[in-house]
Image (cartoon, rainbow, N blue to C red):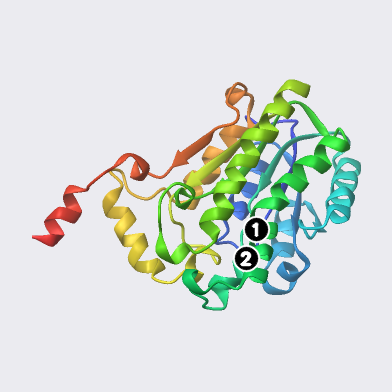
Amino acid sequence: MILKGKKGIIFGALNDQSIAWKVAELCKAEGAEIVLTNAPVAFRLGTINELAQKLDAQVISCDATKVEDLDNLIAKSQEILGGKIDFVLHSIGMSLNIRKGRSYTDINYDWMQQTFDISAISFHKLMQSLWKADAMNDWGSILALTYIAAQRVFPHYSEMAESKALLESFARSFGYHFGVKNKVRVNTISQSPTVTTAGSGIKGFDEFLNYAEKMSPIGNAPAEACANYCVSMFSDYTRYVTMQNLYHDGGFSSVGMSGLLMEVGE
């Protein structure tokens, strides 16, 4: 068990479609002790309490946009787990503009600010709270889930693209400081389009899922495989990987044109 004895916090497990849900299950199977957390609304909309019961893990409500909530989560997690934290997964993202059907060329800027706060700035707030509490063990690992729209245009991804770009920048910048302080590594994983509650809400998602499958030489990476990758990044086998945006997308990010798509057009 490659996480035996390690302690972690998992953000974002909403239901059994969530990548964070699958990460939590695998962390537990690999010997880790975890605390689950999500925003108060997720307790009404999802089934996180079922996961907590299944994994014999405690769950703490936390609005990741509020520093006081994060400080409380980190303090309580250390009490529950009996020490400092070895790994953290930030799997949080939401765009009000997408949810409410506003196009990128007709953005509601108040909603955009909320999108940035929820999807990206929360990551900086989390890391700053961990830093100030000196809550991370030496050689710990902090991960956030991102998407290639941070680098390329996906018209219906709206301002989530800028959110992911900001998220990745925070990982690099805070990764430097955490590395110098106590060798904690900070990375982002750029995952294939995945059937989750959040992903499925994007316009044309099913068509794009099929497109990405044809563009990727070995196909889209499923959520279970992403969980495997996350666990490997939490383990001691990846101690010297930090400040990286790691593509986990079946090769999609390196392909210019797919033969399968060219055949479809013939």
Circle 2 Cα neighbour tier, 10 Å, few/some/many (<14 / 14–19 / ≥20): many
Front residue of 143 and 218 = 143
Front residue of 7 and 105 = 105
In this picture, residue 35 sits left or right of residue 196: right
Q: Is residue 34 visible?
A: no
- Residue at 64% across, 24% down: 236
User: What is the quadrant of the N terminus in the image?
Assistant: top right
Front residue of 104 and 125 = 104
- Residue at 64% across, 63% down: 115
Question: Relative to 105, is 210 above or below?
Answer: above
Assign a secondary structure to mark 1: helix
Q: Amino acid at mark 1?
A: Phe
Q: Position of residue 58 (x, y in %)?
A: 81, 53
Residue 116 has which mark? Answer: 1
Report which residue position mark 2 lands on: 112
In this picture, residue 258 sits left or right of residue 54: left
Q: Position of residue 8 (x, y in %)?
A: 74, 40
Q: Amino acid at mark 2?
A: Met
- Residue at 60% across, 47% down: 166
Outermost residue on the left side: it is 266
